[in-house]
Image (cartoon, rainbow, N blue to C red):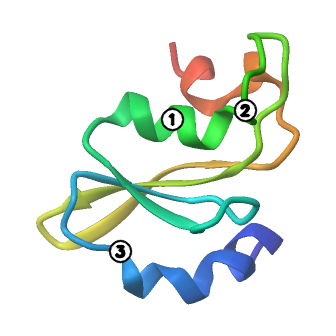
């Protein structure tokens, strides 16, 4: 288990039936729900007003599936914006 997984484990059971959810340990509340994937990506990547040259605050993005929740992305805090996992998959 990575340090991020260990910090976020206690919040996974609180995820509700919204399309996307994020767990961001540095944010209060740590768990938030989002109507779109773009908003979820912004919640994990933006550290409050940074430009594309900044670093992500880190967290996890989940998608609601028929079987529950599925982890889409995990971003470590401090990841440069150009190295975000959804940018690499282009």
Residue occupied by mark 3: 15
Counting from the top left corner in percent of width and height, residue 50 is at 78, 20
| Above or below 57: residue 15 | below
- Among the 4 quarters of the image, the one containing residue 71: bottom left
Of the two numbered discs 2 and 1 in the rendering, the one whose residue sits closer to the viewer: 2
Counting from the top left corner in percent of width and height, residue 25 is at 71, 66
Secondary structure under the numbered disc 3 in the rendered image: loop
CB atoms at circles 2 and 1 under 8 Å apart?
no
Comes first in the chain, label 3 or label 2? 3
CB atoms at circles 3 and 2 under 8 Å apart?
no
Between the C-alphas of marks 3 and 2, the distance is 24 Å
Residue occupied by mark 1: 41
Total numbered labels placed on residues in the image: 3
Comparing 27 with 64, the one in front is 27
Q: Which label belongs to residue 48? A: 2
Q: Which label belongs to residue 90? A: none
Of the two numbered discs 3 and 2 in the rendering, the one whose residue sits closer to the viewer: 2
Q: Residues within 10 Å of mark 2 (few under 14, many from 20)?
A: few
């Amino acid at each position: 288990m990575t340090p991020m997984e260990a910090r976020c484990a206690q919040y996974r059971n609180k995820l509700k039936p919204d399309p996307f959810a994020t767990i961001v340990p540095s944010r209060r509340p740590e768990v938030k729900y989002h109507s779109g994937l773009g908003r979820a990506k912004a919640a994990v990547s933006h550290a409050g007003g940074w430009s594309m040259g900044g670093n992500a605050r880190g967290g996890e993005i989940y998608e609601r599936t028929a079987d529950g929740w599925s982890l889409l992305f995990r971003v470590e805090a401090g990841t440069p914006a150009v190295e975000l996992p959804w940018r690499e998959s282009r």
